[in-house]
Image (cartoon, rainbow, N blue to C red):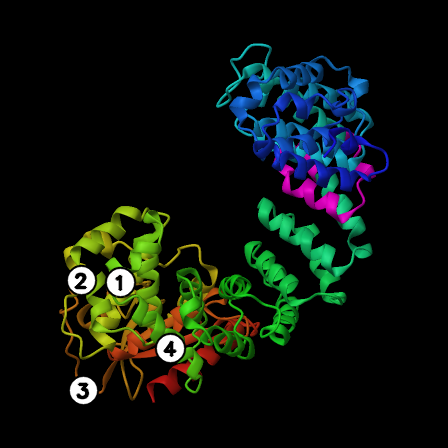
Amino acid sequence: MNVNMLFGSRYSPLARRGLWRCYCSEIPKKNISLSEIIKPHDFKANLNSKSIRHALEGIRASVSNAELRKDPSFTEWIKKIESAHADAHSGSVKAEISGIRDLETLDLGNSFAIKNLENNLIWRCRNMSIEDLLFVLTFTRAKVKNVKLDSMSSTTSGIEDFDDSRRNQVEVKLYKEAVKCLERRWTEISKSDHLVTMILCSNAFSKSANEKIEDRVTDLAQDFCPTDNIRILVAYAKARRRPMNVLKNLTYHLKKNSDGIDSPLACDGLFALSSLSLFDQNLIQKLVDIISNDVDEKLSKELLTHCLISMGRLRQFDQRLLEKISNKLSQDLESLDYKTLHSYAMTSAYLNYRPKLCKSHTNILNYIVSQFSSYEKCIKNIPEGKRDGLWLDIIWSVSLLGFSNHNLFKSVLTEDFLNKIISTSTGSNVGGIRKLLNINAIAQFIDKEYKGPTIDVAAFPLLRDVNTASPSDAFSALCIDIFSNFASPPNHSKVNPNTGMGFSIGAEAVTQKKNLKPMDVEKYGIFGVATQEKNTSLPDDVKRLAMVPASYFDCNLNGSYGGMLDLRIRLLKSRGFKVLVIHHAEILAIPKKTDKVKHVEKIFKNVMS
C-alpha cells in the first residue's frame, strides 16, 4: 500500500481513517519504521486534534508508548504542536479535547504540548457556543475537583494530588474561565441537555447562578416534553439538590402530560422521586402503570432492581406490578445477583408484600434462603465493607416475611455478630441494632419452635438505649394526648416505652376488659424495665394494651400498613397485648379534638371486646 494514497483527496475522511488503521496493523509484519508512518503527514494539517486522534489510533495498535517517545519523527511532531500558534487549532472544541485525551494516553500528560492545547481553549472560551463551554466544563471539572480553587496562585501552594503543578494551573484557569462564561451567558441556555449538565455541575457555580438556572427550568418546563422533564428531575436527584418550587413545577407538568414516557424512563422517574422524597401519589401511580405494561418486554433485571428500590423508598404498594416483577424474576433464578435478591427481599419487607397465592414470590424467597444458607458462602461475592449489613438485611427481610429458618437465626443472634453491628452503628445510625432486635423478638415470640441462642437485651445497656420514639414527632404527641383520656400517664400508662424488640410504641397500659378501667402500669407493665421476666402475671379479666400510632411514614402510600408497622402489631399480639392502632389518615381528617377522642374511644372498645 502506498502511504501517500492515505492522504489523497479521492478518499473520504472515513475511508482514509480505515486505510490508516489497516496500514498500521501491517507495520510489524513488514518491518516498516515508525518514521515512515509519521513522515508522510503534513504537520500543519495534523495540528488539528481530529487528525491527532486518527493518527494515534493506528500508531497505538502497533507501537508501545516508550518506542513512540523515542522516535525522532514523533518528537518533531510533538514539538510542532507545542510551538503552534492558536490560529492553527481551529478545529472543533470536542476534537481538541479528544486530542488532549489521546495524548494523555501516551503518558504525555505533563508535556507542554497538552498545556499549549489547553491554553488555546482558554483563549477560545469567550467565543465558544454553550454546548462547547459545557463540554469544556465537564472535561476540566473532574481534573480540578481536588484543587483548592480559592487558594490557587502562581505558586504551587494551592495544588493537591497532581504531578505537574504548572499544567494544573492551566487546567484551573480553563475551568474557571468556562464557569465564568456560563454564568455570564445563562440567558442563552434553553436546551434541556444543557440544563441537565448545568444541574449536574451545580457545585461549580455560585448560589445566584444556580438560582438563575432554576428560574430557566421553571420558565421552560412547560415547553419541554415529558422525557426532558424526567431527565431534569434525575439530574437534580444525582446532584442532590432539592429546590421545591422547581420540582413541584416539573411534577405538575409530568402529571399534566405523560405522553411518550416508556418503561425505562418511568423507572428513572421513580428513582428521581424517591431520591428527592417527592411523594406525589398521582404521578407515582402513573409511572407505575407505565412500568406494569412493559415489565415482560423492555425491562432488564438491572432496571427491575432499581424499580424495586424506588418502590420501597416511596412506599408504593402496587399488587399488579409486584406480581409481574415476581413472575419475571422467577423465570431465571440462577441469573439473579445478590443486589437483585437483596432489593427484592427488602422491598417486599418494607411494603409488607406477603401474597398467599403468588408462587413466584414464594419461589424467589425460598431461593434467597437457599442462597444465603451460609454466611461464609454468601460473603464471597460481596464487597468487604457491606457484608455484615447485607447479611443482616437479608435475614431481617425473610424473617419479617415468615421465610426464615433456625440456621439463619443462629447466624446473627450471637454475641460476636452483635458486637460487629454495634461497632458499625453510631448515634445517628442505629438501624442495624433495631433490625437485630426485631430478629431476636421474632425468634423468641413468633417462632415458638426455635430453641437456639438469643440476645439478652438486659445484659447490653446500649441495646436498652435504642429508642425509635422522637420527642418532636407531632403525630405521636397527638395520639398520646388523646390516649391519656383513657389511661393517663404516669400511673396508668407508660409513654413511649422501649419494648426491647427494636421499636417503641405510643403508650403501654393495663386495662380491665369489661369496664375499661386502667390499672397501675408500674405494677403490671413489662416494657421499660430491666428484665422482661418481671410482672408477667395479670389478674383475671385484665388485658395488656399497646397504643401504636400509625403515622404517614409507617404506612404505604395507599394507606395500608407497612412491613415494620405490621411486624410491631404481630409481635405485640404474640406477647398477649391488645393493640390499639391510631391511623393518621383517620384521625387527622377529624377537625375537633372532642371528635378525635370519640373516634379513638370506638376503636378502643372494639379492640377490648
**Of pointers 4 and 2, the one earlier in the residue sequence:** 2
Q: Quickly name the residue at label 4.
A: 580
Q: Amino acid at mark 4?
A: Leu
Q: Is residue 247 visible?
A: no
| Magenta span includes 117 | no
Task: Give the CA distance from mark 1 to mark 4.
Answer: 22 Å
User: Which label sits on residue 393?
Assistant: none
**Which quarter of the rendering shows the N terminus?**
top right
Q: Quickly name the residue at label 2.
A: 455
Callout 1: 10 Å neighbours few (<14), some, many (20+)?
Answer: many
**Of pointers 2 and 1, the one earlier in the residue sequence:** 1
User: Which label sits on residue 437?
Assistant: 1
Task: Give the CA distance from mark 1 to mark 3.
Answer: 31 Å
The x, y position of residue 249, in whole percent, is 72, 56
The reply to whether the C-beta atoms of the residues labelled 4 and 2 are less than 8 Å apart is no
Magenta region = 183-210
Q: Main secondary structure of the magenta part?
A: helix
Front-most of residues 104 and 19 = 19
